[in-house]
Image: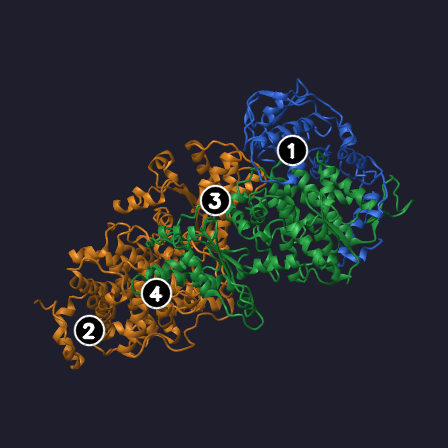
Chain colours: A orange, B green, C blue
């Protein structure tokens, strides 16, 4: 038995930490977490002493903080009212202001660069979701044929599509005296067709189509997506970023309905006839797929805002799994550990989008108005290679546990022991690495991360989002809690204790598929820290079953579009680029303001 | 009694159904038929078992489109023979839902299969409604009990099929409570929309799609008008719009426009079988003068202007309004009856008032201009890029069409009955199940006759 | 009720006012009064201008003829006589006119009033510059004939416009024609007539269709249906102002409490 395969006996934990560390050091040194924590803190990561504490030079440790300091002084001078001011509050930088390694890359950034207001890629990710709606064109085509007697041919569809690129950007088609938008401001607005029918794809100008075969899906996935989308012609509409930055997500479907209807009017030479209201109604209501729906009164937002997006749609928006073959995960992990790890790592990569969209942007920014705290919680999902390290561990546990098993039934009683093993391994990692404990300095960080991993891992084995959710609730509300007698911040356990009873219950605000719960579901709406886990469970269940999407194939394809500003396949790279100030977002106003 | 107004109620064939009915006997408060109908509307819920079975089998739940509804394809399926077990499901539901006769309430639970045993109609016992603040109970209790029954009957539990449990709940309730409403075309549905979708106090009874009423009336024009009137006036009474100064105003408008009082509407239509909206206006003026509802204001200037144009005056504004509303309905019938195309409804509603004002020397147009204003908005939105859809697809509480005293949507319902197949969003497309519900709930058949008969029963109490 | 009844011969009055604008409005609204025919447009030209079907081709239908449809029983439906287009199941088609602001022979709201007095089976929406009229196809063709051949059409200032309807508020071109971004019509200087070179949907016609000479300024001034400071000033139109004031007052008071307008 190699050193790496050997596990510590429970009795060995009675030893004093330092000695134990020496014993396991050769093994630990091979771990990703060791390497990144060493890089992050510059010291022995398994030591629980920071010899330089209080002696690190305050905020001057960090270039970004110095920049902020200078700007604070400049603003105060220019406007006469003080702004950012290091003279107030506690002196920052008494501890190590550690750099953040973006997982899976060599990029090291400052923590402040990951704040959603400082990171243009995060904003663009949100904007790209808010500015997308999908319209099924079949009803419109039927209205045109039946009520107006128009012929629908490849030529008319292409003419329409060329016209709609113009109208969606704010160009006029049917009237003089219409104010038009500077196309430079709306350069990111366009429409594309999605269909599963190859013949239709061939007939449409390739500039106007998201060809499922050519946007990076593994052929086995592309085949499933095409089969399930079928002959229907959907049009995905991207309103310009500036529209959702001025208004809100509810602008998008209105913008889309109006401008796509204008293009129909022009391309098919219609006028103010009653059929136009049918066309507009189809686009605006009957046949539109919103990404998100409206939220409840107390947290009222319009459509397409993050709170109204169901978990299943979040899981379909991310594209990190596109290149994986559509095969059931438990088969893969049983046979080939490395291939299994590839699956796991892609779930981890997807976690970047999920954590940012829910923990940081919805709960942290939209709902609580907190500026700063939730940055760290979300960063847990994509910084420091922590998730990767733990998932490597998990996949090993899974490989060993189920290599001789034919199926893993979606039963809680059958999956619990694996969850136990995995979460205990994760907890031990924190125990072994005081540096990691400092890195994930709040319970919220730890439970979000460990809970998500528990949920994903269980869902991935069983193909059941519900089992994933149960596993997450159990891991946080029972396992972690009893191990350390502490969890996250005060209200965070709400979801774990309610969650188990709620999981399958037939009660009005309980139960239901995880895919169609979401941040607007009442018990989930006021406590953060679990949404990314629930989404992860949906995504993982999809991989567990060898499917190509979670619940909406059209949304899946819509966000595989390479022309989107934010790259939903490689979110970490986009965020890293933005942290380095190299990411170019859309919706800027430079064209209409003085040069600066 | 408060009011000295008596009307005769006529059928759509011009036959007297009830004579000398005091208008208060037509009030939603007192008319036993209307009262019962509103109670049934409020307490009845339906489960489309065939659709539920299909959704479970395909895993197509949580969608949000109203046509096709196939954009979602979940990873869960349940192949359950709900239809084959329909009778057992109905029995089990009745057992679970029923209450003891207690506190003065009888157990009036009713569970009934219809549409070839593919649909369940469920009347929730009054006692359950009586202890509730609102009418949520019909959706909550029936839906959740249905889920329990499926679980019991087909042995689906968190232990053996956790996602199956989730699928059942989502199939019955859509994305609720992640979404505020159920899916469009939800298998669990009532006549009215969900209480939390109310767009204003007292608008409950307006939360119904006009095409549903057209289907409930089996496209018989004056029946659809009567049903729309009942729903509208139910809302008017709940909103307080039909109280005090307005009670008589609403009752008269309801009687003359909605219930063909004194055969006014049918007379107007008969006189103008080959006429126009303009000719209906002239019939209305003639009839109002003959009946003494309006009178010429005087014989000389300033009551007759230099051009010879005469001013008219009314001593009974509420009755004049009722006449005007009856004329309005007749005008819609005459115009749409000619084109047999419902898209022209809004045009009549938008312009009738304008024509009437200038014909009558400025006398108030229907509902004091509320009809005309609403009609113009309706015309624009049913004919433009702003996304309104055809007239029948509107719900009565839609922000565009709810601004009258309940005299607008009966005209829309009438027009939809007369459409011969030009609409995309026609009653068959949006409301096909309501054609069947009409069969299982006879209360929706012959509403005019039933209102008149029950008014006859109570009319002596108002003397 | 019935005992109250007395036979009264009601005289329709349509519209108040003594001056020529009122009189013109009254005339256009009154279906008993014939509109003066100013020009002849052949049937095929009307069909081509509308551009919904080729001349001589069959009408397309949206549903079978009414005689062949089985519909549920409804005495009201049986009462009203359908138009020929409805009877045949024609598709709904439209004609749309834009009326210049400058001495128009007809204007949108007046069109609605006229349509509802002269046509059956009408759908119309009233905008500021244009008005659409939707009817069954053969009905709309018949209506179009009246609307183009008679005094309610001035070739220069009234225009058939399907899409791109803009122009009513613009100044006129050098030939006195209303602006059209689609250039559907031009003034033929030799013929001295306005000629449509495109149909209503702005598709080029095989042969241009003349629609007659533009009316002279004097004629237009005479036929103008709107009040205008230099022709028929609005300020002194006491009858009309009296009626709209009365109507406003009734709406305010009656809208507040119906009984407040008793006997007024």
Mark 3 to mark 2: distance in Å?
55 Å
Mark 1 to mark 4: distance in Å?
68 Å
Bin the neighbour count of mark 1 within 10 Å (Cα to Cα): few under 14, some 14-19, many 20 and up. many
User: B446 or C264, which lies in front?
Assistant: B446
The chain under label 2 reads A
Image location of residue A264, percent across then percent down: 50, 38
Q: Which residue in the protein does label 2 denote?
A: A44
Q: Residue furthest right?
A: B300
Question: For the residues carrying marks 4 and 3, which lies nearer the camera in this image?
Answer: 4
Q: Secondary structure at mark 4?
A: helix
Question: For the residues carrying marks 3 and 2, which lies nearer the camera in this image?
Answer: 3
Q: Which residue in the protein does label 4 denote?
A: A378
User: A499 or A423, which lies in front?
Assistant: A499
Q: Secondary structure at mark 2?
A: loop
Say yes or no: labels 4 and 3 on the same chain: yes
Q: Which residue in the protein does label 1 denote?
A: C82
């Amino acid at each position: 038995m190699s050193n790496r395969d050997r596990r510590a006996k429970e009795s060995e934990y009675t030893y004093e930490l330092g000695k134990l560390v020496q014993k396991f050091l050769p093994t630990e040194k091979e771990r990703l977490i060791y390497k990144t924590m060493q890089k992050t803190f510059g010291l022995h990561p398994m030591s629980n002493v920071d010899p330089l504490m209080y002696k690190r030079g305050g905020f001057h440790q960090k270039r970004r903080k110095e920049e902020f300091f200078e700007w604070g002084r400049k603003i105060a001078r220019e406007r006469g009212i003080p702004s950012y001011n290091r003279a107030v509050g506690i002196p920052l930088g008494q501890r190590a202001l550690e750099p953040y390694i973006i997982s899976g890359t060599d990029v090291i950034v400052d923590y402040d660069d990951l704040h959603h207001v400082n990171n243009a890629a995060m904003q663009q990710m949100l904007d790209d979701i808010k500015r997308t709606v999908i319209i099924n064109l079949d009803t419109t085509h039927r209205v045109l044929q039946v009520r107006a007697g128009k012929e629908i041919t490849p030529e008319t569809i292409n003419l329409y599509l060329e016209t709609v690129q113009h109208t969606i950007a704010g160009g006029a088609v049917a009237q003089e005296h219409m104010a038009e938008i500077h196309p430079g401001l709306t350069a990111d607005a366009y429409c594309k067709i999605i269909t599963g029918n190859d013949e239709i794809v061939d007939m449409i100008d390739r500039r106007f189509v998201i060809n499922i075969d050519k946007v990076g899906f593994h052929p086995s996935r592309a085949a499933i997506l095409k089969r399930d989308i079928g002959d229907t012609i959907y049009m995905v509409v991207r309103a310009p970023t500036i529209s959702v930055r001025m208004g809100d997500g509810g602008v998008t479907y209105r913008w889309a309905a109006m401008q796509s209807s204008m293009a129909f009017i022009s391309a098919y030479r219609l006028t103010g006839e009653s059929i136009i209201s049918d066309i507009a109604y189809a686009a605006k209501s009957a046949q539109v797929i919103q990404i998100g729906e409206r939220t409840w009164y107390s947290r009222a937002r319009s459509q397409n805002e993050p709170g109204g997006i169901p978990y299943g749609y979040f899981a379909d928006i991310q594209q990190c799994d596109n290149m994986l073959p559509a095969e059931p995960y438990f088969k893969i992990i049983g046979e080939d550990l490395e291939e299994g790890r590839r699956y796991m790592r892609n779930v981890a990569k997807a976690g970047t989008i999920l954590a940012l969209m829910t923990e940081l942007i919805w709960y942290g920014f939209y709902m609580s108005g907190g500026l700063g705290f939730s940055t760290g919680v979300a960063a847990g999902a994509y910084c420091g290679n922590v998730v990767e390290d733990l998932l490597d561990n998990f996949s090993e546990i899974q490989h060993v546990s189920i290599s001789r098993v034919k199926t893993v039934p979606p039963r809680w009683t059958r999956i619990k022991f694996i969850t136990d093993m995995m979460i205990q391994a994760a907890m031990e990692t924190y125990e072994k690495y005081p540096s990691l404990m400092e890195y994930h300095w709040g319970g919220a960080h730890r439970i979000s991360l460990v809970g998500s991993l528990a949920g994903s891992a269980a869902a991935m084995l069983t193909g059941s989002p519900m089992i994933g959710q149960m596993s997450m609730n159990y891991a946080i509300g029972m396992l972690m809690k009893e191990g350390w007698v502490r969890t996250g911040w005060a209200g965070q356990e709400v979801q774990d204790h309610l969650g188990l009873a709620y999981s399958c219950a037939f009660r009005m605000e309980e139960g239901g598929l995880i895919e169609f719960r979401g941040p607007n579901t009442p018990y989930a709406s006021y406590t953060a820290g679990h949404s990314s886990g629930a989404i992860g469970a949906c995504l993982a269940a999809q991989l567990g079953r060898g499917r190509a999407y979670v619940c909406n194939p059209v949304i899946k394809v819509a966000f595989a579009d390479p022309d989107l500003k934010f790259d939903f396949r490689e979110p970490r790279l986009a965020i890293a680029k933005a942290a380095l100030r190299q990411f170019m977002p859309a919706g800027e106003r430079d064209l209409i303001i003085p040069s600066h | 009694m408060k009011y000295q107004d008596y009307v005769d109620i006529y059928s759509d064939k011009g036959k007297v159904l009830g004579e000398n009915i005091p208008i208060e006997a037509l009030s939603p408060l007192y008319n036993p038929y209307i009262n019962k109908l509103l109670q049934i509307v409020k307490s009845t819920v339906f489960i489309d078992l065939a659709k539920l079975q299909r959704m479970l089998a395909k895993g197509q739940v949580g969608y949000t489109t109203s046509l096709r509804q196939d954009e979602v394809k979940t990873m869960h399926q349940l192949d359950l023979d709900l239809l084959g077990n329909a009778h057992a499901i109905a029995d089990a539901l009745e057992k679970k839902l029923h209450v003891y006769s207690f506190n003065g309430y009888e157990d009036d639970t009713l569970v009934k299969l219809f549409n070839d045993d593919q649909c369940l109609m469920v009347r929730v016992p009054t006692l359950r409604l009586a202890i509730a603040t609102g009418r949520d109970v019909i959706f909550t209790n029936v839906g959740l009990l249905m889920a329990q029954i499926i679980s019991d009957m087909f042995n689906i539990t968190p232990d053996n099929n956790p996602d199956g449990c989730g699928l059942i709940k989502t199939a019955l309730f859509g994305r609720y409570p992640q979404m505020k409403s159920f899916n469009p075309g939800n298998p669990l549905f009532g006549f009215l929309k969900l209480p939390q979708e109310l767009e204003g106090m007292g608008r409950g009874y307006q939360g119904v799609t006009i095409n549903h009423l057209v289907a409930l009336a089996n496209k018989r024009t004056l029946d659809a008008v009567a049903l729309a009137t009942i729903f509208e006036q139910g809302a008017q009474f709940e909103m307080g719009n039909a109280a005090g100064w307005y009670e008589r105003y609403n009752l008269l408008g309801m009687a003359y426009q909605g219930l063909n009082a004194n055969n006014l509407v049918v007379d107007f239509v008969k006189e103008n079988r080959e006429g126009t909206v303009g000719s209906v206006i002239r019939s209305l003026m003639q009839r109002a003068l003959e009946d003494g509802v309006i009178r010429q204001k005087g014989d000389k200037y300033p009551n007759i202007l230099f051009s010879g144009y005469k001013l008219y005056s009314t001593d009974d504004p509420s009755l004049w309004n009722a006449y005007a509303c009856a004329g309005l309905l007749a005008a819609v019938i005459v115009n749409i009856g000619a084109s047999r195309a419902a898209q022209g409804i809004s045009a009549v509603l938008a312009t009738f008032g304008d024509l009437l004002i200038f014909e009558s020397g400025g006398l108030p147009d229907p509902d004091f201009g509320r009809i005309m204003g609403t009609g113009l908005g309706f015309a624009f939105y049913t004919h433009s890029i702003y996304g309104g859809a055809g007239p029948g697809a509107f719900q009565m509480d839609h922000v565009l069409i709810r601004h009258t005293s309940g005299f607008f949507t009966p005209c829309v319902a009438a027009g939809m009955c007369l459409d011969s197949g030009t609409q995309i969003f026609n009653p068959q497309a949006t409301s096909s199940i309501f054609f069947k519900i009409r069969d299982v709930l006879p209360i929706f058949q012959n509403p005019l006759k039933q209102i008149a008969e029950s008014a006859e029963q109570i009319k002596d109490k108002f003397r | 009720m019935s005992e109250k009844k007395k036979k009264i011969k009601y005289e329709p009055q349509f519209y108040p006012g003594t001056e020529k604008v009122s009189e013109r409005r009254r005339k256009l609204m009154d279906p008993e009064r014939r509109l003066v025919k100013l020009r002849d447009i052949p049937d095929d030209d009307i069909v081509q201008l509308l551009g919904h079907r080729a001349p001589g081709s069959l009408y397309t239908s949206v549903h079978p003829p009414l005689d062949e449809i089985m519909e549920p029983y409804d005495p009201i439906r049986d009462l009203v006589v359908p138009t020929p287009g409805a009877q045949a199941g024609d598709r709904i088609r439209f004609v749309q006119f834009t009326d210049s602001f400058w001495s128009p022979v007809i204007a949108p709201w007046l069109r609605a009033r006229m349509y509802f007095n002269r046509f059956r089976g009408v759908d119309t929406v009233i905008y500021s510059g244009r008005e659409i009229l939707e009817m069954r196809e053969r009905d709309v063709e018949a209506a179009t004939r009246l609307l183009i051949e008679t005094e309610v059409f001035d070739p220069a200032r009234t225009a058939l416009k399907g899409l791109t309807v803009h122009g009513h508020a613009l100044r006129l071109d050098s030939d006195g024609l209303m602006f059209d971004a689609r250039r559907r019509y031009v003034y033929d200087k030799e013929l001295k007539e306005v000629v449509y070179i495109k149909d209503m949907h702005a598709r080029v016609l095989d042969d241009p269709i003349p629609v007659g000479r533009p009316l002279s300024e004097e004629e237009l001034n005479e036929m103008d249906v709107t009040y205008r400071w230099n022709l028929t000033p609005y300020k002194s139109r006491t009858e009309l102002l009296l009626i709209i004031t009365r109507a406003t007052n009734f709406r305010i008071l009656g809208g507040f409490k119906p009984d407040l307008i008793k006997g007024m």
